[in-house]
Image: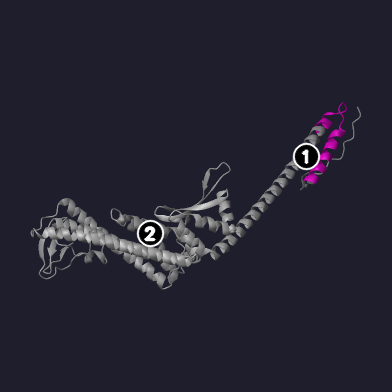
Amino acid sequence: MATASLPQLPSLSAAISGNNAAALDAEANRYQGISDSFKEGQLTPLTAVLKGVTGAVAQGKSQKAAAERDAKQGRLDQLLELKAQMEQHQMEVKDRLLAEQEAKSTGEQLARATDQASVGDDTGLRNWLASNPQSAKVLTSELGVPVESMNFTKLNGVDVLIPYGRDSEGQLVTGKPKVVDDVLKAYAPQAYAARYATRQENALNEAKIKTEEAQARNYDSQAEARANPQPKPLSPTVAKLQDETLNAIGSLGQTNQNISKIMADIDSGGLKTDIANRTVSSIANATGNSTPQSRAMANYTANLKKMVNDSLLLAKGVQTEGDAQRAADAILAAPYDTAAVRERLAELQQINQRSADLKKMTNDQLRAEYGHEPLDYSAYEHGASGKGGKAIESLPQGAQQIGTSGGKPVYRTPDGKTFIAQ
């Protein structure tokens, strides 16, 4: 039987050299042509094998070409999507920049509208949004519905503005709260400064009133106790409370000393908490090339959270608890603004001192109920160990033991002061 001549097969290098869909399609057609040249009914065992092999190669290359086209189309779709996202982002950035410029030029109007909203009238805010279309556009983008106005309210003791609008079905949609202090600081700095000063003055006046009320109660208790000049031993419960108070006063004193050190670093220009200085300081410390700024930053970072947590813990149970929480939230909410950090640390220091004063008066009031004079707290306030105060190495001349507190001797000096020896 005559043997059919075999068609020329592509070389192996040609079979694998295709690097694009068109080349693969051409090779697929070529192999398919070879496969089709082997006619049914004229096949020998060898030509049958060749027909199957070349047909399979043709199909594989065709599928690979289709896969490559799909991959290229996928990459093109991704690039188009990325381009659309970038254009959208550029538009949003442009809108925000325009809104920033617009808001800065109308900051005083916004401040007055915010004061008006604080008493329940949002007319000023509605008018401000109507005359600031870029700001309204940005808020509308955030809400997903047209912005109508903003509500003035408090969240965790912090004044905020909450933008709102309504969807197509009339359902209320609210946005992310805007902290009033942050808004005024950015767009109406003079109004912010006046607002902060007023708040500080009100806080101090309120603290003075509370202090005077507590002092009045203290005087009443002392006057009543003087009717019975013989002091009674403190009960175990009161003695324990007194020890806890002394420990808290010592810790508050130490916390305020740490705050003073950080404030001194800020005042001297040796500590700046912005992102750039944080990054440079971290690198300097990590590479063994520390600077005064990097060391001050390391001290600030290591102590800030502890100072805040200690202040919150030690303010619990007294009238300063809410003030301490508000100051702590403000410190942690603006860690990169050096001036804001300094202001809040000073505020926290004042709150800590008020906490200590309230604890002293409460303790002296309890002591007065047992006929005891007020304690001298100086040993606990300055450089206290936080474990009951500093040890008294020698007794003042003429001091006499008048009892015990928590198992520790209590002395009275000739001038009437009382203290606990450690």
Left/right of residue 333 with respect to residue 214 in the rendered view? right
Q: Which residue is mark 1?
A: 62
Q: Can you give x and y, in whole percent of width and height, for residue 244 in the image?
A: 23, 55
Classify 10 Å Cα crowding around label 1: few (below 14), some (14-19), many (20 and above).
Answer: many
Q: Residue furthest right?
A: 2
* Residue range highlighted in magenta: 21-49
Relative to residue 417, is residue 27 depicted above or below? above
| Residue at the (42%, 58%) spot, across then down | 332
Residue 48 belongs to magenta span: yes
Secondary element under disc 2, as helix, strand or loop, is helix
| Residue at the (59%, 61%) spot, across then down | 97
Amino acid carrying label 2: it is Ala
Q: Residue furthest top?
A: 41
Quadrant for the N terminus, please: top right
| Residue at the (87%, 34%) spot, across then down | 37
Q: Can you give x and y, in whole percent of width and height, for residue 190 in the image?
A: 46, 67
Contact? badges 2 and 1 (CB < 8 Å): no
**Which scheme is used to colour this image of the protein?**
one colour
Main SS of the magenta part reads helix
Left/right of residue 268 with respect to residue 240 in the rendered view? right
Instruction: Let me know if residue 297 appears in the view.
Output: no
Q: Give the camera-side residue of 413 and 408.
A: 413
Q: Can you give x and y, in whole percent of width and height, for residue 139 in the image?
A: 55, 54
Q: Which residue is mark 2?
A: 327
